[in-house]
Image (cartoon, rainbow, N blue to C red):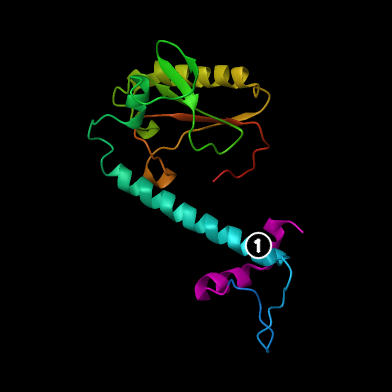
Amino acid sequence: MSCQYMAAFGSSLLRSSITFGVLSPLKRPNSIPLFQSSFQHPVRQCARRAMSRVSATHDEEAAARAVATEANSGAPTIFDKIISKKIPSTIVYEDEKVLAFRDINPQAPVHVLVIPKLRDGLTELGKAEPRHEDILGHLLHASKIVAEKEGIVDGFRVVINSGATACQSVYHLHLHVLGGRQMKWPPG
């Protein structure tokens, strides 16, 4: 039985487990654990995974909101420091306009970030202006080049998070090139 099916099947169990913190093994009336071996009930496994996803998602959302408050300060971002080589990175592709490097927290076997070398007010896609059309097109083309170099051109995803509600964590426009595994839909 798939975890998704069991999560739907046991949604009331999951809700009550989250609400009341009841994720310990079931107890018999005489306090002997129902599961003596290392076997864990599949619905419980899914509930634990869901709890960790809820916690990680909450942390990610909180971090994105915190970073957004200083998004337009003009201060150098971590990406500016990577461009200037003050912070090391594994570069996959570089030309005069863009830099592509491996993400330090990959979400797929291939996870490369593609960024413009010059921010020029392009902190997020939602701030794009007509003057940014050339660099936006160049970023997409560079993403295709990265996919070719990484051997995933037959199937990859390009993700752009724009703003705090999309969990953007660095306010320097960047594209995530993801591949090397089957992608799921919907993505978020």
Q: Number of callouts in the render?
A: 1
Give the farthest residue toward the top. 96
The residue labelled by disc 1 is: 45
Give the farthest residue toward the bottom. 30
Q: Is residue 66 above or below residue 19?
A: above
Q: Position of residue 101 (x, y in %)?
A: 48, 24
Is-magenta flag for residue 145?
A: no
| Residue range corresponding to the magenta coloring | 1-22
Q: Is residue 13 above or below residue 2?
A: below
- Measuring 50% from the left and 21% from the top, which residue is drawn there? 140
* Kind of residue sitting beneath label 1: Gln
- Measuring 65% from the left and 31% from the top, which residue is drawn there? 180
Q: Position of residue 20 (x, y in %)?
A: 52, 76
Element type at marker 1? helix
Horizontal arrangement in the rendering, residue 36 relative to residue 153 (left or right) = right
Along the viewing direction, whichever of 54 and 130 lies nearer the viewer? 54
Q: Badge 1 local density, few (<14 within 10 Å), some, or many (20+)?
A: some
- Measuring 37% from the left and 36% from the top, which residue is drawn there? 170
- Tell me which corner region of the image, top left, top right, bottom left or bottom right, holds residue 158: top right
- Tell me which corner region of the image, top left, top right, bottom left or bottom right, holds residue 51: bottom right
Along the viewing direction, whichever of 57 and 134 lies nearer the viewer? 57
- Measuring 49% from the left and 32% from the top, which residue is drawn there? 103
Image quarter where the N terminus lies is: bottom right
Is-magenta flag for residue 7?
A: yes
